[in-house]
Image: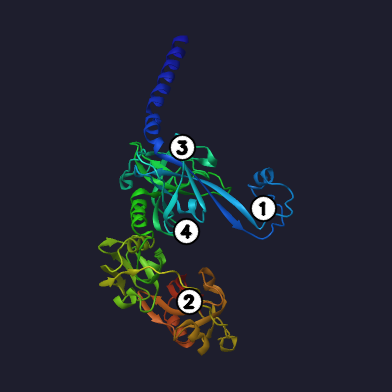
Amino acid sequence: MRALLGLWLLLWTAMGFAQARDLPDFTELVEKQGAAVVNISTSQVVKTERFNHPFPLDEDDPAFDLFRRFMPRQMPGMPKEFKSESLGSGFIITGDGYILTNAHVVDGADDVLVRLTDKREFKAKVIGADKKTDVALIKIDASGLPVARLGDPNRLRVGEWVVAIGAPFGFDNSVTAGIVSAKGRSLPQENYVPFIQTDVAINPGNSGGPLFNMKGEVVGVNSQIYSRSGGYMGLSFAIPIDLAMEVQSQLRTSGRVSRGRIGVVIQEVTKELADSFGLAKPQGALVASVEKDSPADKAGIETGDVILKFDGKAVNQSADLPRMVGSTKPGTRSQIQVWRKGVAKDLTIAVAEIQDEKGAVKTGRRSKDNATGSANRLGLVLSELTSEQKNQLGVDHGLVIEDVRGAALRGDLRPGDVLLALISKGAQTDIKSADQLNGLLARLDKTSIVTLLVRRGDSQTFVTIKGVSDK
């Protein structure tokens, strides 16, 4: 018995040593590449009104206790101007002092100070910053600096080890490790970056620091975390280094980034929408609206088209299109394939340069005097558009939703929405009157999937409703 127990302990110990040998060793990577990582501190003078409430956080907020510990309980006479300081990270990409970091690290800074691993400090000049990708390029007056090696993020595999070096909470040259959780991740309000998702511990101060593969090559720029507490929760996102280098090249040349645009508002193609438009599977980018006199308008793209390809590359999901168009040089003539009424159609489009976003268009008030009174088969109470509303919206047809009932409650429809068109079995029909719409609905059976083109505020979207009533 003792012999068996001894043999079991020997095998268990051997297995432990074997597993330890299989774990990655990051020491050589850190020793060789750590010197190229820098700490960035910024300061700016902020003008503000007197801060009356001592704690701007609720007591159940996870950050309340931290805020209470480091801020005085009473702040009478707080100056209208005060100095705000923040910390971040970056890494050297040229021996003569060009450094990559995040745009949000240097945004609005009056002074940018860079500290190297050998404790030397330099004032940095911001060459340019691009908020859309969160990439910034700064420059210090130095030479012979250690330079980070760059890798190919396209060769990253989900599940492989990666390492981050930065200054979380100001702790210089902190090293954390994890794996690649996903690639090409789209985030809300981030249309131009296919993020690398990792489970590497990233915290405030890591922003702008490098993400290394096991070869010691930079594959990404740490940019964001997903958190409910303000700290690391296992979801970190990095900007692919190839995209960051493209951006910095333009920043170094002209101080700004030029992007292509075609003038469409798009949305994701769901399974229900794919069925409505006669697509074999959910794919592409559904055109919700086309800007008048835009490249898309001139190329013949229409509302309801599904863009399947751009410049020969498949648009697998709607988030792919802004990246493809944005990376295209303005003035380029590109081929675009759309799905229209059950048929693929090839068009040529001249890509323009992206402009600042326009202000929202205010819609007119609904007119209940023109309401139909009872709900139709979709469960909608509708009213005709007045001439004033048509002028304000820039449309010549449509119906205003006064109330949402029945089947319509299953879709994302709201009072005040304007119905512009109905799509069923791949065919799109403009909605010009309540009688016309009711006639179209009368031809549908109870299991039909109905898709509506809806104007909401200054934007358009497609809404799908499954099934209609027996009315």
Quadrant position of residue 50: bottom right
Of labels 1 and 2, earlier in sequence is: 1
Name the element at disc 3: loop
Of labels 1 and 4, earlier in sequence is: 1
Q: Which residue is the site of mark 1?
A: 57
Q: Amino acid at mark 2?
A: Arg
Relative to 59, is 115 above or below? above
Front position among marks 1 and 2: 1
Q: Nearer the viewer, residue 386 or 435?
A: 386
In contact (CB < 8 Å): disc 1 and disc 2: no
Front position among marks 2 and 3: 3
Residue projecting furthest to the top? 2
Query: Is residue 180 something one can see in this rendering?
Result: no
Q: Which residue is the site of mark 2?
A: 455
Name the element at disc 2: strand
Of labels 2 and 3, earlier in sequence is: 3
Quote the CA–CA distance across marks 4 and 3.
39 Å
